[in-house]
Amino acid sequence: MDWFEILWTTSFWVAAVRIATPLIFGTLGELVCERAGVLNLGIEGIMTLGAMTGWMSVYMGADLWTGVILAAMVGSLLGALHSMLTVSLGLSQHVTGIGITLLASSLSYYIYRLVLPEVTSPPRIEAFTNYPIPLLSEIPWIGEALFNQSPLTYLAFILVIVVGLVLYRTPLGLAVRTTGENPSAVEAQGMNVIGIRTGAVMFGSALMAIAGAFLTMSAFNAFFFNMVNGRGWICIALVVFASWHPGKALFGALLFAAFDAYQMRLQQVIGSAIPYQVFLMLPYLLSIVALILISRRVAIPQALMIPYRKGER
Amino acid sequence: MRLEPRSEVSPVRFILAPVAAVIASLLLCSGLILWSGASVFEAYWMMLTGSIGSSFALAETLSRATPLIFTGLAAAVAFRARFWNIGAEGQLYAGALMVTFLGTGEINIHEGLLPPILFMGSFAAGSLWLFLPSLIKIRFQVDEVVTTLLLNFVMLLLVSLLLEGPLKDPMGLGWPQAAPVLESAELPRLVQGLRVHAGLIIAVILALLIWQLQIRTTLGFEMRAVGLSRNASQFAGMRVGNILLITALISGGLAGLAGYSEVAGLKGNLTLDLSPGFGYTGIVVAMLAQLHPLGVIGSAFFVACIFVGADAMSRSVGVPNYIADVVVATSLLCMLVSMLQIKYRIRWKS
């Protein structure tokens, strides 16, 4: 098989959609936070804690969907903490976010070690299995990639549509978007800026936690250290790449994942002529290049990272 | 919740802020210790004696504080100018790589010149690794947080690549580690038989120098001004881009020196586990010090106490040593709230 034929294999496209799933959840979550004017750098840690919570609940005997819901709840709790500090108290969103990431990831590792002190190889769980959608999954080529996936993948696609509709077609979405552009205008309409921002950050953080839960409950079926491995930071780059638009975020995540799946297969084709680390670097470098290319055209929410205090300008 | 500005800022509150934050975080984390079944008092006592209870423990804590002073200064310098360098981890490894290139005998350098060359080389390497994202920031307005974070992963992969390839020590029994640095390149131990080394002296001197730079020079003033308001600085005729770039070069260089001090002072060679997140912990160190260079020395010592103490405690009472990371992260968040209270009063009812 040479480098071009990879693109025609079904397994490549199946893998691309699978790799994209956590990125879709994470990017969507960050997007909702940023649209309301709050940068959430806690994403990397929230994903880790979501991964641990989902996995641990199932390991303790809960069923899979309960695990997902628990992960989402823990995520929104961290979101509440982040917004209490950055929205209510108006603290630096950069430093608070890094703090949340440090706290959430160290808490995950602490709890994991506390429950399983002596374990060396991470125990596996009965994870989500692929659920082929009748008829649709039989379409050649596309069917296998899009309609024979984990239920969480379908949830991700549905959420893109729901978030897109809510943001652009409902009064609530208008309020969230305006809060990110001009909070004083929202206040003037008699709405509560602090409340809207807190809600958006809690919802977004719940999505980030589900992104993490996908890793332990549908991809690797176990929890291990450093498993999120920068995916959260890549989501933050993808939000910029998508110009804060849910549809473009889906496209960006799929494009990125396709590239990731491609480099993994290319490694096998090329063999050891190029060290494998070079391939692993590419996704990170690609994110940086994408940020530079898009930088001239970004429509950044005007009030992003600016804390809102009533009566202050 | 509502914030009410205080009419005057009392110096007492300024000094009490970090103390209050630390106490609050220890109280918050005691819940986690209780959950593990250990006694909270015993656990914290173990942490205290395990970190400063004997000359051996104290030396261990000081050697752990050394890289944290470097990375803490790196964060403090950058954050003062509101330049968010979250890439100290990568810059640390860049410095360590340079020490390995120059100091393992591959390149012939006169013995006496080796230490100063390694010092400058690792500073330059750290600067260079931050040069790229700062240029992107200044030229294209791309947020430096994401780029510096992503470059940490790139640097770790680069180190892994080099350690499995050209830099692999043939005497390393197949482990991915670099050859040890020459004896003439090593930083001397301060006390015979203990791990605390001359890197600590360099770190303290640098903290003093940075402090003097900030309060006595025009550059230091400009760095603070740019941090307070970009627009006002621009309006006053400062070249904001250049000042940010210089700030970045100093910050990256300081983080690079952490790599030099760890390789030449403690470990002897470069491995992939050279730093257990010193770059990220440096951010906490800087915030606990309220970005003051001299405060960094104290807060690095405190954070080192937590890490070394937690290792000792987890051996004797069986609380996982990740508790140290939790305490440190909680301290950061408590410190942010605590610093806010220096200037504002928090009213819970609006």
Image (spheres, coloured by chain):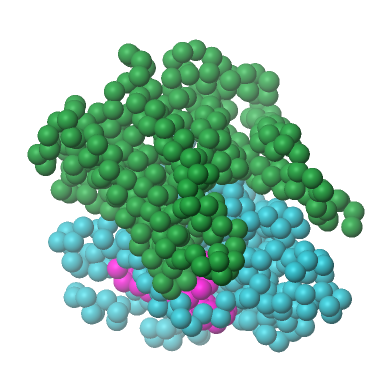
Chain colours: A cyan, B green
Instruction: Establish if A9 lies above or below B197.
Output: below
Q: Position of residue A156 (x, y in %)?
A: 57, 72
At a point 63% along the width and 23% down the height, the residue shown is: B44
The quarter of the rendered structure image containing the N terminus of chain B is bottom right
Instruction: Establish if B137 lies above or below B2.
Output: below
State left or right for residue B274 relative to residue B332.
Answer: left
Displayed quadrant of residue A14: bottom left
State yes or no: residue A219 in magenta. Answer: no
Toward the left, the furthest residue is B108
At a point 51% along the width and 32% down the height, the residue shown is: B297
Q: Position of residue B249 (x, y in %)?
A: 38, 53
Toward the right, the furthest residue is B349
Instruction: Establish if A32 lies above or below B169.
Output: below
State left or right for residue B165 relative to residue A185.
Answer: left
The quarter of the rendered structure image containing the C terminus of chain B is bottom right
- Foreground residue among B208 and B218: B218
- Foreground residue among A71 and B70: B70
Whether residue A59 is visible to the viewer of this picture, yes or no, is no
Q: Position of residue A192 (x, y in %)?
A: 82, 70
State left or right for residue A189 relative to residue A115.
Answer: right
State yes or no: residue A241 in magenta. Answer: yes
Whether residue A4 is visible to the viewer of this picture, yes or no, is yes
Instruction: Establish if A142 lies above or below A102.
Output: below
Q: Position of residue A9 (x, y in %)?
A: 30, 78
Magenta span dominant secondary structure: helix
At a point 58% along the width and 39% down the height, the residue shown is: B289
- Foreground residue among A209 and B139: B139
State left or right for residue A10 relative to residue A313.
Answer: left
User: Which contiguous range is marked in magenta?
Assistant: A235-263
